[in-house]
Image (tube, rainbow, N blue to C red):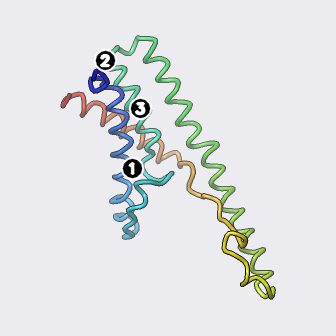
Amino acid sequence: MEIFLNFPLWAALSAIVLAQVIKIPIKWIVTKELNPGLAFSNGGMPSSHSAAVTALTTGIGIIDGVTSPLFAAACVFSIIIMFDATGVRRQAGEQAVVLNMLIKDFQSLFEGAKDWNKKEEYQKRRELKELLGHQPIEVFFGGLFGVGIAFLLHQLY
């Protein structure tokens, strides 16, 4: 049962869960829209990916020291994950928005087609997931959240 003693692992897992759950009240405060499904979705404030990797890296730094090779590897890993969240994944989400708009426009051209209503829903369309990546501010606060969770849990550990 030594896995339960792995502080960096539990810091990272806790940061993921807490970052996902905190998205619900943040969304409610900003938009007055209650959406419990945010706890299981991609994107949003704060970035749970950033929270996880920074909590992991911070936990490793606390346990092994910031001069350890493991901390260096975790730090580079964190930078890559956070860069990807604001780059490739965010761009894919923005492209999904445009593609979904094109699909809707295309479908409206053929609304009057006589057999359209006879088709199954899956034949009509399937929207692409638009909320894939993060804005830089979401990644930044996800990172801060992860560091904070790691230090907080270390005090309780």
Which residue matches tag 1? 20
Rendering coords of residue 144 (x, y %): 38, 38
Q: Residue at x 48, y 47 (%)?
A: 137
Q: Residue at x 31, y 31 (%)?
A: 150
Q: Residue furthest top?
A: 68
Cα separation, mark 1 vs mark 2, equals 25 Å
Q: Disc 3 versus disc 1: distance between alpha carbons?
A: 15 Å
Asked which secondary structure carries label 2, the reply is: helix
Q: Name the image quarter holding the C terminus.
A: top left
Relative height, residue 68 to residue 97 (above, below): above
Nearer mark to the viewer, of 3 and 1: 1
Type of amino acid under label 1: Gln
Q: Disc 3 or 1, which lies upstream in sequence?
A: 1
State which tag comes first along the sequence, 3 or 2: 3
Say which amino acid is labelled 2. Answer: Ile
**In the orientation shown, which residue stands out farthest toward the left?**
156
Q: Nearer the viewer, residue 14 or 117?
A: 117
In the picture of the structure, the residue carrying the numbered disc 3 is: 54
Image point (60%, 58%), residue name: 130
Residue ID for mark 2: 63
**The quarter of the displayed image where residue 108 is located:** bottom right
- Whether 113 is drawn above or below 52: the answer is below
Q: In x, y percent, where is residue 100?
A: 68, 65
Residue drawn at 44 percent across, 32 percent down: 53
Q: Position of residue 62 (x, y in %)?
A: 31, 20
Tell me the SS state at disc 3. Answer: helix
Instruction: For the N terminus, give its image quadrant.
Output: top left
